[in-house]
Amino acid sequence: MEFIYQYAWLIPVLPLAGAMLIGMGLVSYGKTVNKFRQGSSVFIVSLIGAAMVFSFALLWSQIQGHPPYNRIIEWAAAGDFHLTMGYTIDHLTSLMLVIVTTVAFLVMIYTDGYMAHDPGYVRFYAYLSLFSSSMLGLVISPNLVQVYIFWELVGMCSYLLIGFWYDRKAAADACQKAFVTNRVGDFGLLLGILALYWATGSFEFNEIGDRLQELVQSGSLSVGLASLFAILVFLGPVAKSAQFPLHVWLPDAMEGPTPISALIHAATMVAAGVFLIARMFPLFEGLPDAMNIIAWTGAFTAFLGASIAITQNDIKKGLAYSTMSQLGYMVMAMGAGAYGAGLFHLMTHAYFKAMLFLGSGSVIHGMESVVGHDPVFAQDMRLMGGLRKYMPATAITFLIGTLAISGIPPFAGFWSKDEILGSTFEVNPILWAIGWLTAGITAFYMFRMYFMTFEGEFRGKNDSIKNQLKNEQLQRLGLAFGPGAMNSKELTTDVPELHDHEAHEGHHSDTPHESPATMTLPLILLAIPSILIGLVGTPFANYFEAFIHPPGEEAIAGFPPLEIPAEFEWTEFLVMGGSSVGIALIGITLASLMYLSFKIDPGAIAKTSQPLYNLSLNKWYIDDIYNAVFVKGSRRLARQVLEVDVRIVDGIVNLAGLVTLITGEGLKYLENGRAQFYALIVFGAVLGLVLISGIT
Amino acid sequence: MDTANFPWLTTIILLPVVASLLVPLIPDKDGKTVRWYALIVGLIDFAIISYAFYTQYDLSDPGMQLVESYAWVPSLDLNWSVGADGLSMPLILLTGFISTLAILASWPVTLKPKLFYFLMLAMYGGQIAVFAVQDMLLFFLVWELELVPVYFLLSIWGGKKRLYAATKFILYTAGGSLFILIAALAMAFYGDTVTFDMRSLMAKDFPLNFQLLVYAGFLIAYAVKLPIFPLHTWLPDAHGEATAPVHMLLAGILLKMGGYALVRMNAEMLPGAHAYFAPILVILGVVNIIYAALTSFAQRNLKRKIAYSSISHMGFVLIGIASFTDLGLSGAVLQMVSHGLIGASLFFLVGATYDRTHTLILDEMGGVGKQMPKIFAMFTTCSLASLALPGMSGFVAELMVFVGFATSDAYSVTFKVLVVFLAAVGVILTPIYLLSMLREIFFGPENKELTSHEVLVDAEPREVFIIACLLIPIIGIGFYPKLLTQVYDSKTIQLTARLRDSVPTLAEQAQVREPLAAQIFRAPAIAK
């Protein structure tokens, strides 16, 4: 088995090679490569397939008890400083490799159907492959610098893919917003890495943790400072995993094509933050202040995301806020010290959320044949309804995903969420209460989404709703622009034109249709882990935690856990599990009363609690505040600095030039002793300065 | 042929200069022969540079190599003395590379092609000479001479305000170089012997006050060239008016002269004064990074935007030079080479975009990505390189400067925290202005006003080739930085050791607890 470890570097390199080849082909022989659409996609899918087989082999070997494997080369050196790069394969890595490759593989198959008619089909595959490569590189990183490198690279891929449809203004704004917001997090991560290197002299995960503990214990580094370093590092995951206050980019990122939303913005990249916390667990573990901040950030984000999701009408936006909320759970688990539970939820969530997103893509695909290629119509749930009749496979898999995320046993989400809630309860009951409440809201908004989309009557031909949506979009414009636009003209986008365009093109049929097999097959395949994967981590036979446990800690039970651990208590499990299932059922009942049988009018509730409704609908006004403070503020500051540069720094230079000119010329006439003449010169100089700085 | 004693550097410098003198003799009616001639001369010279360094240069030797010295004007003690060490060798290679590509980039020049290529070739030799000469007086001469072609290239082929820009450029740099002359003369005549030779000058033992004065003089001259705030305002004007090939030379090579000379003269020859000026360099570096990033963000003119981004990137060079660590200095050299490649590629693409849109104002562009996907792709790649994306050379350079400075034992912790924090703010600002720029040029719906009167054609193979040539080293260094760092590593280690020797030790400094301000502005010191 040793040889698969020696060649494990192929896992990220294979997709990279595919992306490079196709990318170079696109730049040099664009037309020819674009003709070989299926050829290029099969090539790239088979490369990621090979990486997937490799990853399974590694996971199997790790389960068999192979010791962790490390391989490094010297990457950069200067004097005594040596920086190494390489890869490390241990339990966590092999698990992440399998998650990433399986989801990527299925998403790529799905893409063939979803992007079939897009002119950028081949380019999309190249980007997908590049992303997979960066993400795989991230999970095998043996040290912090390499993590930072791939961290930024996945961010870049996300930028390219969100802006894939670059002629859409919303996509253009969203991709920039995503990159810049992530850079704010990277800024913290970079400072954290530098600070930790300064303190410990190492970039290796375990060494940093150990040495920092020693330094804190010996008193040469204060606990406060160590916690500050840890929080700086945590800023990276805050941005990447869309935690408050840097979550604003994720919902906007839904402007990218749906396969991307499933792969990057639900299953893999956004989970990288949780992965990094897991990697740095030896560091965080010993710093209770940092752990508290992590836990509370996660809990607040979980609640924030869920509270916004209940009023979203765009199916992808709703899922995006739900992703944010679920990531909050994972981060909260990490902060509460429930290492295994957090990663367990990461795994189950990756599968069921990827499936939900792909399902929403299938729905959008079906809707587009009725309402045309306009995201405003194709993604709005108010125009959907009754789709179960037309797209049964999508509906069933979506329902499975909905049940999984709502935490209904025996679906995957129940086991992981229950474990998180159970472990948080032991740490802090208030955190548990937030998580428990959020679980209820989750069940409510997910079933609201399911009922609005798949049950009831189909509303896609209702023109009055369409007109309403059109008006809402016009109102929204002017609020939604990303950071950096210096141009006020940009605000007047040609919206009417967009709609004319739509009116001529779409309307192929009156009813939506089921998606092609390349799209439904991945859905069905993802449904299997969504149902079953939770069973590897049941509290009475927790194979998962026996395999995944914090470095340095021995698993409580041996592997595999042959018998129920002695301390396992059925009553406790039933109480905890029962309460979370109970609140989920309340949420589901409420949703069915409001959106299935229409016994309760949602509009009336919205009216009676208008401020709360508006708060949720407007995303707690966080985007508006950021826009007013940071985006406009930075633009104003930049303009002022430029003014200073032109008028003062350059102005002085030009003044100096002018003065020499005037004095040189004027010296011959100057000695006439008339005071008003001197005044005239001074006046002229000032005038000249004003003129010149005005021109330049 | 005795390759070891062959005058390689002299040949490398003189070949383009002599070839440029032959340009008027070339029969050329349509202006198309002379460009091939210039390109071939450029390629031959670059080949000689590569061959000479490949066969004759020993990477492990930190000293001067390929040394030649001939008496020129003995009465003035002026020697034609050239050589290359780890500091100049990568920059000479860079010069040959960028200049050759710049000639290829000037293919569409139709106005007075003979004069244009004459100047380009003259500049080719002049620039290499700046990096190779080892005699102060000679350095001053070639420094001045290389300004002349730039002046003409700016004032004849530039944009609308070209005369203003060219005059400003020449006044600024010529004014700055006066200080070089004064400082060089002062150094030469100090002590018992009169010498202009750099190595002899290095051996001289100058008193500290003298060093400080001379250092300040050099600093002004090189601050203009690099440029350092507040002496940078010639650069946006010059860059705003220059044509693409001149642009590539300005950003790719001319700015590096400032950084090179700062290391060569200020740091290497005046290490005593460097210890006192280093904190000032660091502060100026931080100001450069943030100030220029903000101005770049507010700029509406594409060329000026990129020009300011160059200023911002040069801030890292300053911090690296003043870090007193192997890693920081290595990062500074790497940043110079890396920015030479990235800056040249960005300016070339700006030129290529301008050739199609005929406007540099961002408000008049928009949505051109649809019609020019290749230019869009290349522009995106180069912008990402410029914002220090990992996998490209800029990231490695900035990371090395960051880690080098953060681990430097010469500064107080407060000072380091402040500097690293502010420099890292630049890391947030850079993508803001670069990605906004991309978005305003390429993204969004097509700008109907623009497409109604301009025909937007995608990149031709020549343009793709030039960018590919620049991207190969950018990505190569980004993937495996040792490719470049090992070339000059021995030199930077030796230089850092020399610099650290002259830093006062902690024991010499008072160990009393100081107020915050004093801690921040404390001169560097090392515990030995």
Image: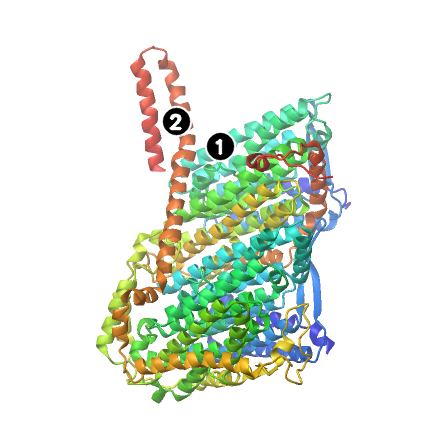
Is residue A556 at least partly visible in the picture?
yes
Image-quadrant location for residue A139: bottom right
Q: Residue at x 52, y 38 (%)?
A: B228
Return the residue nearer the eye: A599 or B498: A599
**Dot 1 amino acid type:** Tyr
Is residue A20 at least partly visible in the picture?
no
| Secondary structure of residue under mark 2 | helix
Q: x, y percentage for residue A42?
A: 53, 79
Q: Is residue B211 above or below residue B85?
A: above
Cα distance in 3D space between marks 1 and 2: 14 Å
Return the residue nearer the eye: A285 or B165: A285
Mark 1 belongs to which subunit? B
Residue that numbered label 2 is attached to: A658
For the C terminus of chain B, the quadrant is: top right
Residue that numbered label 1 is attached to: B172
Mark 2 belongs to which subunit? A
Query: As drawn, which residue projects farthest toward the left?
Result: A464
Q: Residue at x 31, y 66 (%)?
A: A612
Q: x, y percentage for residue A253?
A: 42, 66
Image-quadrant location for residue A196: bottom right
Return the residue nearer the eye: A211 or A126: A211
| Secondary structure of residue under mark 1 | helix
Q: Is residue A388 left or right of residue B210?
A: left
Image-quadrant location for residue A466: bottom left
**Dot 2 amino acid type:** Leu
Badge 1 crowding class, 10 Å Cα cut-off, few under 14, some 14 to 19, many 20 or more, is many
